[in-house]
Image: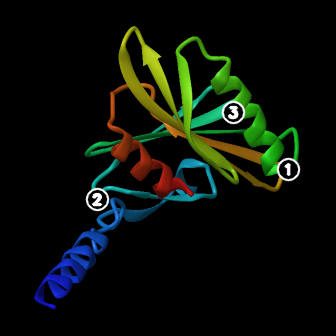
Amino acid sequence: MVRIFFYCALILLISCKPSPTSSYEELDLLSYGMPISVLAPPGAEVKKEDLGVMQSIIVKGDQYNVQIYSSQSQTIDVEKAKRQALEDAKNGRYFSKIIEEEDGGFIFEKDVDGTIIYDFRHVKIMGDKEFIFQKGLMGTYTEEEVRAMYEAVK
């Protein structure tokens, strides 16, 4: 009986692991020109870039680097836009495999000369604007860190 209680308590403790985004705070990006919010580590830095036909915002923090692209949407169908992003990722030179796929986004793996790199894409459409969220271009992150970034932008 004591063993059963011990195993139940152990399972309960393991399942109560805090969410990787539990320490993140909501960050409103409207003042940077995008009517969206993401979860980000406290004190995250935000940088805006105008790329002509699209806008880019980079949000950087501790083990966190998210880039958001905003452009004119070609569709109102989020799944169609996600399928295009998925096709683009699969056609990438270093694409290795899809880790997880769900409505509006996916996490994938790249193999760059034996170095495994994790990345994600998440698509949102608001009115006539399409927002594509991805891991920032600089830095290497673990699968768990990339999952936390992905969850933070959904």
Give the labeled residue for mark 3: 86
Determine which of the numbered discs, if any, sits on residue 63 in the image.
Answer: none
Q: Position of residue 56 (x, y in %)?
A: 57, 35
* Image quarter (top left, top right, bottom left or bottom right) of the N terminus: bottom left
Q: How many numbered marks are there?
A: 3
Amino acid at circle 3: Leu
CA–CA distance in space, label 1 to label 3: 14 Å
Determine which of the numbered discs, if any, sits on residue 77 in the image.
Answer: 1
Amino acid at circle 2: Pro
Q: Residues within 10 Å of mark 1 (few under 14, many from 20)?
A: few
Q: Is residue 77 left or right of residue 60?
A: right
Q: Which residue lies at the image location 26% right of the left edge and 74% below the top edge?
A: 11
Amino acid at circle 1: Asp
Determine which of the numbered discs, if any, sits on residue 42 in the image.
Answer: 2
Q: Which residue lies at the image location 33% right of the left edge and 34% below the top edge?
A: 141
Q: Earlier in the sequence, mark 2 or mark 3?
A: 2
Q: Residues within 10 Å of mark 2 (few under 14, many from 20)?
A: few
- What secondary structure is found at the residue carrying circle 1? loop
Q: Earlier in the sequence, mark 1 or mark 2?
A: 2
- What secondary structure is found at the residue carrying circle 3? helix
Q: Which residue lies at the image location 87% right of the left edge and 38% below the top edge?
A: 74
